[in-house]
Image (tube, grey):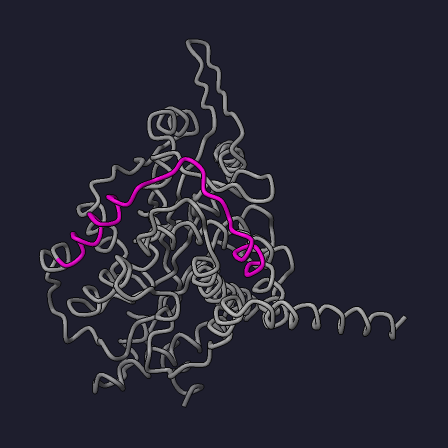
Amino acid sequence: MAKRKRAKEVGEQLSILKLIEEKEHVRNEIKGLLAIKQDKAIWRGIIATPPGSLLEKTLDAFKRYTDIPLEVPFFVTLSYVSAHLLRNDASISYLGKKIRPDLWTIVLADSGNGKTTSNDVLAEVTALESMPESASAAKFIDTLAEFNKSLWVRDEFGKFLAAMENLSHMTEVRDYLLQIYDGKRISRRTKKDSVVIDDPALTILGLTQIANFGQYVTADMMLDGFAQRFNYSIAKPDPERPMWKFPTYNYGAIVNAIGNGWQKLIETPLHHTYMISADGHEAFETSFRLLCKSHDIPGSFFRRVMWRGVKYALIYHMLLGKSGNEIDVNDMGWAGRLCHIHLQDVAEIIRLQGMSDLERKLERVEELRNKLRDEGKPFTARDVVRGVWGIKNTQEARGLMSLID
């Protein structure tokens, strides 16, 4: 049995190597996927940012004018590109399946780290209307009927997920979201009228505080099928851009810097259906195998992250300004790099949720100490109470400070 298993593994490895040998351009993309060890001083998302693209212009502007962690404007930008494609009814045909370029993303960041500012900038630049909030399941369906195939931006998303799990009147919204994810027809009848939504779709951007995410979304919930339908990104402060350097944000300069990039993107011809080239298909399968061997997360999570790489490939196709309807190996290569980042963050979230409350607090206190030290500021118990969620008084703060010292 062991010999047969080993022979199968060797056979799989040889088939991957044979593919890479036969396809030079596929090999080059795979090399890019494997080039993940980089200088810690360089922002990690650079490996998934095409030079000269709208994405790069946006990140350059936020890096120049703000201290906002770049993961925030990165995924806000991708969400707006996704919404642009959804609104124009674009889809991908892959192995006989129709795939919509909808993204469901949750960005975790510290409080006050520019989640709202980033969204406001892209909303102004793109002039795309987002679906407003709803206070009930009935209102949610009425609003969806009006804003189907658009963007839904929701703050405090961790709290929202917890409500859907624990509150009976929110369970219905959870069911509707599952139907939206699968593109299934939604109908709701009342005594007065009925609402029917065919081919529902949404791009969802959930923004939430990393400090209390584990309080609302447990490890069990993360392993549940619903939570796995989202991509996750952890946005940490950039020590090279401390807050004291940016007392204000030059909002107008950011808008001006990325306006031309968005205009160029929306002028790129759109197609109703995009196809994956043969080389793009091979690149996806090769990336899947190689990344599967390098990330230790639940298999169901891994498969869902990688499958969303097909959606990312179309978004990168647009970011690269390509006017054809064929998604190629280059598009898939960029998508694979981004999937690698998501896999890193999923593993980190699962690890954090497996930690005790004490361990989480210690880690946050240590991060705060290092941040203040880098800024040349004193590290006090009052700072800990203000900056670390869940620490209630200076006595507890001093105890935790002594442990990390």
Front residue of 156 and 195: 195
Taking 344 as reference, is 169 above or below it?
above
- Residue at image position (69%, 68%) is 15
Specify whether residue 295 is painted magenta. no
Specify whether residue 271 is painted magenta. yes
Label count reads 0
- Residue at image position (59%, 70%) is 20
User: In the rendering, at what x and y percent does residue 3 appear?
Assistant: 87, 75
Outermost bottom residue: 405
Outermost right residue: 1
User: In the rendering, at what x and y percent does residue 11 appear?
Assistant: 76, 70
Taking 404 as reference, is 209 above or below it?
above
| Quarter placement of the N terminus | bottom right
Taking 21 as reference, is 210 above or below it?
above
- Residue bounds of the magenta highlight: 257-284
- Examine the residues drawn in magenta and state their main secondary structure: helix
- Left or right placement of residue 155 versus residue 295 in this view: left
| Quarter placement of the C terminus | bottom left
- Left or right placement of residue 101 versus residue 371 in this view: right
Outermost top residue: 192
- Residue at image position (76%, 74%) is 10
Front residue of 236 and 39: 39
User: In the rendering, at what x and y percent does residue 272 appear?
Assistant: 41, 35
- Left or right placement of residue 344 versus residue 139 in this view: right
- Residue at image position (50%, 32%) is 176
Front residue of 101 and 43: 101
User: In the rendering, at what x and y percent does residue 348 appear?
Assistant: 50, 69
